[in-house]
């Protein structure tokens, strides 16, 4: 099921389901080396979403700003490497959406517990905004908000479920987007959690 949400934004429903167990096993390895943490925004707010990363750099925020860092600030060591199953899923999904050759160098792992949310924002901390972003949703469903290029554009609501993959490129790359507060329920495999893997070329 290939669904075009907007120009350049392609939803591949269930695209990650075949890789579910190997994605989750790889995720356990990442979290063992680089645990989830709640980071602080430049404005001083602690994020409700807990995060970690793998790959050559990881997205971090603190009072000093948002950036990609080559070392995990918690450990002072490099982030865990990008697992092969992550890379293969991201590159093949991007190719199916029309972005052949996409080669991410980082995966941000977001963990939502009930009540966690992400307010409307743009992703523009990457060096070259010509590359798409691939996102993989696992665990509890979430209501995703997908707006336009202006903060005021009324967002469309898109439910994202376990196994869904979305590729955001071209004119959609700078769209405002966010995630509504996660409703409390339990997923058979992930319990009271939603995990989102966000693949980017940052460097
Ligand atoms: C649309 N994460 O980490 S992924 C983020 O579900 C982030 O955790 C959300 O937004 C989450 O920055 C959404 C989907 C996503 C990612 C990047 C986008 C959608 C996007 C960039 C442009 C437009
Ligand atoms: Fe984002």
Image (tube, rainbow, N blue to C red):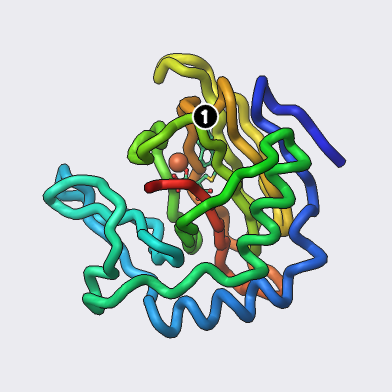
- Taking depth in this image into account, of 145 and 100 the one nearest to the observer is 100
Image position of 59 (left or right of 88): left
Q: Measured along the vertical axis of the image, is residue 85 above or below residue 99?
A: below
Q: Position of residue 113 (x, y in %)?
A: 48, 63
> Is the C-beta of the residue carrying label 1 under 8 Å from the nearest atom of ligand 1?
yes
Find ligand 2 in the image and state its quadrant: top left
Q: Residue 3: percent from the left, percent from the top?
A: 79, 33
Q: Is residue 37 above or below residue 28?
A: above
Where does the image place residue 152, in percent across and percent down from the top left?
42, 15
How far across and down, in percent of the image, does residue 51 sit? 39, 63
Residue 40 to residue 20: above or below: above
Residue appearing at x 48%, y 38% in the figure: 178
Question: In which quarter of the view is residue 55 placed?
Answer: bottom left
Q: Nearer the viewer, residue 104 or 192?
A: 104
Q: Is residue 146 left or right of residue 78?
A: right
Which residue is most to the right?
Answer: 1
User: Image point 48% across, 77% down: which residue?
Assistant: 30
The residue identified by callout 1 is 173
State which quarter of the image contains the N terminus: top right
């Amino acid at each position: 099921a290939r669904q075009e949400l907007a120009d350049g934004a392609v939803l591949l429903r269930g695209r990650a389901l075949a890789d579910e167990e190997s994605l989750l096993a790889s995720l356990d390895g990442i979290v063992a080396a680089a645990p989830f943490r709640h980071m602080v925004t430049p404005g001083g707010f602690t994020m409700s979403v807990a995060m970690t990363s793998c790959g050559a750099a990881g997205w971090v925020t603190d009072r000093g700003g948002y950036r990609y860092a080559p070392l995990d600030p918690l450990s002072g060591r490099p982030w865990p490497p990008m697992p092969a199953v992550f890379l293969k899923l991201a590159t093949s999904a991007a190719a199916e959406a029309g972005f052949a050759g996409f080669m991410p160098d980082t995966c941000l792992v977001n963990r939502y517990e009930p009540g966690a949310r992400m307010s409307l924002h743009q992703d523009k901390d990457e060096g070259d905004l010509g590359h798409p972003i691939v996102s993989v949703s696992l665990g509890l469903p979430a209501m995703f908000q997908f707006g336009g290029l202006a903060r005021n554009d009324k967002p469309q609501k898109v439910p994202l479920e376990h196994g869904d993959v979305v590729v955001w490129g071209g004119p959609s790359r700078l769209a405002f987007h966010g995630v509504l507060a996660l409703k409390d329920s339990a997923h058979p495999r992930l319990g009271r959690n939603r995990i989102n893997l966000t693949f980017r070329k940052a460097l």
